[in-house]
Image: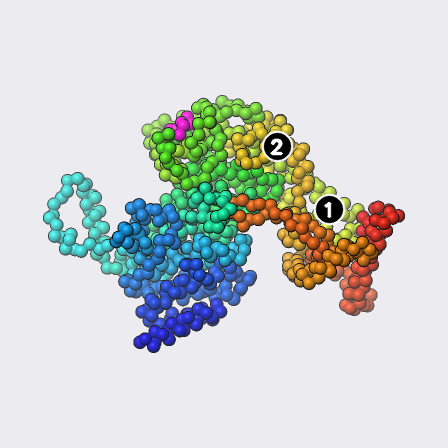
Amino acid sequence: MTGGQDNLMTRFTHALNSPIHNRCAELTVLIDRCSSKDLQNIFPTLMESIFGTSGGLSWGLRNITPTSHPQDFITLHHFLGPLGPVFRLIYKLLTDTQVKYEYSVTHLPQKVRVYLENSKIPPFYSDLLNVDPQTRNVHSLSLNVFDCYMFHFAYHLTNPWQQRMRSAWSVWNTVYYVLSCDYILHFLPTDPNVVVLPQLVHFTGKNPTIIPLQSVTSRPQTTPKLFRTHVLQQSAADISALHQPMQQHPRGEIWRSETVVQVFIDTWLYNDQLSTVETAFNPQSKVNELPTGEYIRIIRVFVKQLHAFSASGRNDTTHLGELKKIVQPMLQGPIYAFLRHLVYRWPLDGSFRLVLELWLSFIQPWRYLAGSQIKMQDAEIDDPHAPNTKFVDQHYLGFIADNLLAYTVIFQQLLPRFSRIDIASPKNALMLFRVCKVFGQPDLVPMIRDIESCIENLNHSPTHSYHSAWSSTLPPLSPTACWSTNTTTTSLNVSSSEYHSTPNTPKPSSAHSSFDQSTFQTPRINVLNNKWAAIVRHRIYEWEGPEFCYKPMFTRNAAPEVYQLLKQIHLAEHVATEIVQKRVEDAKSQYGNLFAAFFKSLFAQDDATADEFSLEDRKKAPVYLSMSKQYLMDIFKLDTATLEQTQTPLHTTFDETASFHDESLPRNVDFSPASAKVRAKHLKYQGDPDLHPIRSNESAFLVRVLYHLAQKINESYSVQFRNTYYRNDFIGKVCKQILCPPTLTFTYDKSVPGYSPRVQKMLPPRLSLRHCASHSFLAYLLIGFLFVRYLGYGTVSFAVIGFLAWCVYVLLRAVFHYRHTNGNLYNDHFNDSF
């Protein structure tokens, strides 16, 4: 027996040290042939090898993509799939209900550990805790095989040790991402007729402790007087359910789905890397890093599937339907805190689109119904001309009331971001358009307005001083007197009747300052008002704490921040239009001198293509901004006359809206239209030119190949290039026409959490071949080749002729540049003609 065990461990160790394809094949054979007793011993080692939970090397699930390692991707996807060999191992071990594995609570988020240690034990963990008999502290969880795998899998996404081994932040289509989507879709089915496969008839999961029959029947048959009859009947029904056969127990059908929901929410959303505000911008902290793009995308798929899973519960009469009714309440608190931290800490760049779409997915559950394609993007979300006519069903009024803070507070938190970025950029204009379009849906803002009108605290009562010991873990909001705040302050002189008016903010009109309460007079409506008010007050206390002072956004006239944003949109719309006009004029001017344009496009980099965005993207920006402005006017019920009043002062400075901005920003920045237009014309990419994002007029394959080729040449001859480039003779002038000049580049170091310092670097003289990857160069090359072939010459002749033409071009440029710098004998504009 010992020899057989040693042989098994030898084969198992050999399989773990093999390449991934052979590793999975050998492990599959062991899983299918070994007994359950042998598999129990190798399962913990297999989990540690796959996920590296304790800090060791893992299988690299977050680095393997279909493009980088296609064969390994397919192999791992099959091996770890919901019906693959690993889950065959799991279900084989589940036949023995006594098989348990310990999972250290140090791998759980801090907030979950606090719940377990403070006797606030969620029902899911009630029968899983291992308590130290001496210290009375929870030191581990006792898990079955399925739960153990899910805890290891979920922790792999947030494990700080594994995040340090990530290849790149932008890599997201990994094995881990695909497996996460598969698990979410497989164990949370939205079709009531679909069951989770395989169906388990031999194990029911984590059942409540079965009470012996003797302890129930031996008690005197007396009827307590403090309980109603139906309560006793329900208790008797629960006891009888405990004694049903194991294969008939209700939890036997839902416990795997329950585990997936609970484990993913607790591990992914209670993230310690985002939960501490004080260390958010601490450069010394190595743990508090931003989630990756893969992380945010997985959370978004999870949120959308939970919405669809919950929506399918309306017509679901199975036992799984009971779980579908509670998944949204389980999600909403953790996701709200998760989003608040992300919005607070995310840098001001285009990657914020991931966070924005996650938030918009959460607050629009009506978009994700049962049977919808969760992993597919909607085609119309980026189309400014798509009609916004989908009404929000009244069924979701309860969800909106339950998550009112997710609509209003995060919207308030977003506005300062748009005031600090260039919204004339197509990426930023699209993000603003997405937010405005979502809130511009018919009936959404009226529903929010109805709920806000039900809150009793409409007079901006001060924060409660007797809760001064409360310490909120959520990020602070902008200290403005017009919107909600979660910080105790006595400096805000808030009026109970209306917001403070600024010189550029119109007075509230009578049509909008008083909300119509005529529809809230019947007794039934008053009951609903009390219901919504109680729900909102409970959520405020639970999520934000007693120091939070909520102020409605939509029941009163628009705050000055809205008018300031409208001013910025109006300015950015003109800037974006001018950029488009300039690009169009530059494109037309290229045809003025065909001879110069030919040589410039053939041998040099086109200045017009230095823009990060194509002309088509630039043309969309003014449309996005125009539609955003219209949506905002409709949301806050502003008319054109009111908007014109806000646009009359054309030289508004930053100091006039300082309370709306970050105090760390400079106060002498001029945001007048004239200065903004001047700055917009000089915006350009300042990084390494060879690392500029691939343009639409370039071949992606050739850009990458030529970049690596040029890098090899520069590494081999960097010293010769530098010495020759700085020579003052004719050879140095020729070298200057071939090599790129020294260039000062600027980049942002995003390895520092929260803050990205600007770093400069001087590039030496170097060879660049990127212009050879442009479509125009390739087109001219093809035309020349066809012309030479038409004249009867071969490929070698074409190459020689092309090389000689390039040499003549370089020598002519060097001659005229050399004579010009030494004697100024020739026309200054001759060089420009090339």
From the top left corner, tell me how far across and down residue 734 is, in percent: 80, 56
Q: Is residue 102 visible?
A: yes
- Quadrant assignment, res 446: top left
Q: Which residue is drawn at 76% across and 58% down?
A: 724
Q: Residue 587 carries which label?
A: 1
Q: Can residue 300 be seen in this view?
A: no
Give the number of callouts.
Answer: 2
Depth order, front residue of 493/638: 493
Depth order, front residue of 443/629: 629
Left/right placement of residue 171 relative to residue 585 reads left
Magenta region = 456-463
Give the amino acid at mark 1: Ala
Q: Mark 2 points at which residue?
A: 668
Q: Is residue 354 magenta?
A: no
Find the distance from the CA under tag 1 to the CA under tag 2: 37 Å
- Quadrant assignment, res 462: top left
Q: Is residue 462 magenta?
A: yes
From the top left corner, tell me how far across and down residue 574 is, in percent: 65, 36
Callout 1 touching callout 2 (CB < 8 Å): no
